[in-house]
Image: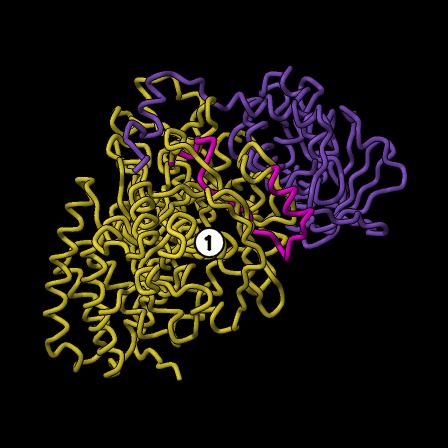
Chain colours: A purple, B yellow
Amino acid sequence: MTLSLNEVEALSRKAVRGVGLSWGLADEAARATRWLCAQSLDGCGHLASALDTLDDCAPGDTAPGRSGSRWSTSTGRMCPLTLGPSLGDFAAQLNDDGWQLEGVIAPAMLLPYASNLARRRHGWVTLRWSDVSATTDGFGLSLSADREGLNDMIASRVDIMAGGQMDTPQAVADRAAPQTQDLASLTAYAARTYAPDTEASRLLGAGAGRSDND
Amino acid sequence: MAETPSTVVPLRLPSHVMRLKRLGSLHQSRLSFMRILTRRLAREGWHFSRPKFNIDAKGVGHAVYCAKGPDRTYSLVAFAHDLPDEKRSDRVIAEAWDTTFALFDGTPTDEDIARLDHNVPLQEAGRITGRELTLSRANRSVRLWAHVVDRLAKGQQPDTDEIARVGYLMRTTAVYGSGKFGAADRETIEGRDEMKAPFQAELLTVYLIRAFVRDLVEHLARAEGGEKSVTLDPAIAQTLGIGNSTGLGMAPFIINHPILFNNWIRVREEAIARVRGLPEARDTAAAQFRDLVARCQVLVADWRSDHPAQVEKLAGLTRDLDILTKHVDDEIWSGTIPWDRLCHWSEAQLTPEGQELVASLILEPHGALVDDLADDLSDSLETSFQIDGDLTVATTREQIVSCFGWALSLDWSAQEAQARAWYVSEEKLEPRLGQRFEEPIAEYEQPLAPARDAVAAYGALNGWDKNEPIAEFLLAHPEHRHTIRRAQISALAPYSEIHDNTIGADVMPIDMLRAKLSFFGATKFDPRSDRWVRICMYAGAPYPEDLTPQNADFWVYPEL
């Protein structure tokens, strides 16, 4: 079964909120997951991996701090969904030193945010960690042949810098085919955003109680 | 040739237009999405056919209706079911329907139809694919359906009073598009000319459903009455629309899509301002306006509701039309910028319902001047908008004041200011509006109170250096990210925010529903509570086989 990208985005938004991130971060994480799927990558899998780790952490423990070109946390684990938006926000401050991002959970989730950063800068941006080298022009994505590291649960260090080459752009996809267990995992996180029903809410909430069968 | 405005009339201010009371009084106009669609279908000479109608005497089976345009064909695949009365419910949470539909992108093969047969009747419990653009369902209006079948079977036409009282034989309870339940994403079709304006796939679906419903009622009358039976008088058939029940689920849409909603409002405001800036009224334009006012009186006379709020608004609108009729017969057209003067007059003399009717009606004689604005209704920025982290704290504060200044003086600590909370229920996964202080729902609240959140962000910005980039604030306060985003959007899109409290004790979600549905082109809003509304779509429209450039536009207004 394939999902539309709209379904991926809607589910991701709720799932991210379900692990306790703010709605604003959830909106952007959902767009990010969709973008990964549109680049023929396993967006749902990478998001599920991120959320599995984040669900075991207090939000404050994984929120990034910034000191010069270094982004880090005191716990050594950094939330890519909180870090990612800030990369775009600080786009103007990325200089020749690049940025060093320490302890990034599910680093593949940073790729879409790097694309936002590239768009803000009107130029290419490259990320490197383990065997992965990824360049984006703000729209597409070019990945190194070696890319085992895409599935890293955590990267001790990700380097991000302006420039790069778009040698092997990813094929564009308009559907997503997530793994069953990732879909189940995201669905379970998303369910945390639903309020349990009460008799009062059934009667009050939806404005029922009036015949609609005429 | 289009006339040219001589005077630059400023757009009406967001603080005026974006109040819920006014949004809840909007009317369709020539820029409504249904009318954009019917004009296009006629202009481009779309060809309609019914290659399949495999429905038995009990009304069970399937049918296919094709709409072939210059570049592509779209096909409504319709399934008709035998639904026991006790299972019929217009609630979006129902599990069985009289009819179910998908709009197929192209011409379906028998395999496609078989696949859809296994899924479409299940609606939310089934799956469709990227080959389908919409998924929808409709239920009979029980009384009118039985009456019409019975009459036609006996060789008689239905009672026109009965027809007018209901207005439709079936009402849809959902028309899903944009990738829902597996359908194609909007992004995959938005580049097509015929799909550029908003909701064209959904509204083409409804337009074809209307033809199917007429054919189905005639088919069942024939099955019952045999030789004796007659077909529906085309004049009566044309008055029938398709009803729709719309509940709370649609209300968050206009908050969740601020740029898109801005575009709808801004396009209408721009069109109004263009007409108001015209130096004079052509005789033909004034005559057409007078004619449409008269036709609106018929439309409003047939507009039924027993919801107290709407009853009062309808009484006001009826009075407004009487006053307007007298006013436009006077010598109002001779001075300068007559349309602008008419609008000023309406603001002093009419209720908001009447004012907004006038604002929509003045566009009617001026297609050449305003129809090009239809190209600006959609939004390509919504998904690509990015926060500008370089903007300063001072600029952000100004943005919040500019858009939410009215909310800064509200006492948000008062219970009535936050009496409601929007949430999604576990049981049905549908949006609901609850009582924050009476139910355990606050922790599940959806971000549908932009004004309250803007005030909170404004408070959090206290103590920050005014020259600090907002990126620093957001790094420390990611919980305000959605608000800063909206504030930056509002600077580009001044009609993006509702200028009222969407969680106050007195909020009426039907105002939000009406605002959205008016842009679709809906008429006869009939609130059934403060949070769901019935409407009518395509009443008066020619059926596909009768559609011509001559009748494709003004069908909304009943002929006198």
> Is A213 situated above or below A78?
below
Residue B187 in picture, x, y percent from top left: 61, 52
**Foreground residue, A88 or A54?**
A54
Horizontally, residue B73 falls left or right of residue B138, namely right
> Is A103 situated above or below B76?
above
In which quadrant will I find the C terminus of chain A? top left
How packed is label 1: few (under 14 Cα within 10 Å), some, or many (20 or more)?
A: many
Give the magenta range. Answer: B90-118
**Foreground residue, B412 or B553?**
B553
In which quadrant will I find the N terminus of chain A? top right
Chain on which label 1 sits? B
Residue at the right extreme, as displayed: A145
Q: Can the viewer see residue A92 in this picture?
A: no
**Foreground residue, B412 or B255?**
B255
Q: Please count the marks in the image.
A: 1
**Foreground residue, A24 or B213?**
B213
Residue B183 in picture, x, y percent from top left: 60, 44
Horizontally, residue B207 falls left or right of residue A145, namely left
Based on the displayed image, in which of its 4 quarters is residue B400 positioned? top left
Residue B197 in picture, x, y percent from top left: 49, 60
In reply to whether residue B111 is colored magenta, the answer given is: yes
> Is B439 situated above or below B419?
above
Residue at the front extreme, as displayed: B227
The three-letter amino acid code for the residue at tag 1 is Phe
Q: Name the residue under label 1.
A: B212
Q: Which residue is drawn at 29% across and 51% down?
A: B151
Residue B319 in picture, x, y percent from top left: 11, 57
Q: Which residue is drawn at 34% across and 52% down?
A: B153
In reply to whether residue B116 is colored magenta, the answer given is: yes
Residue at disc 1, secondary structure = helix
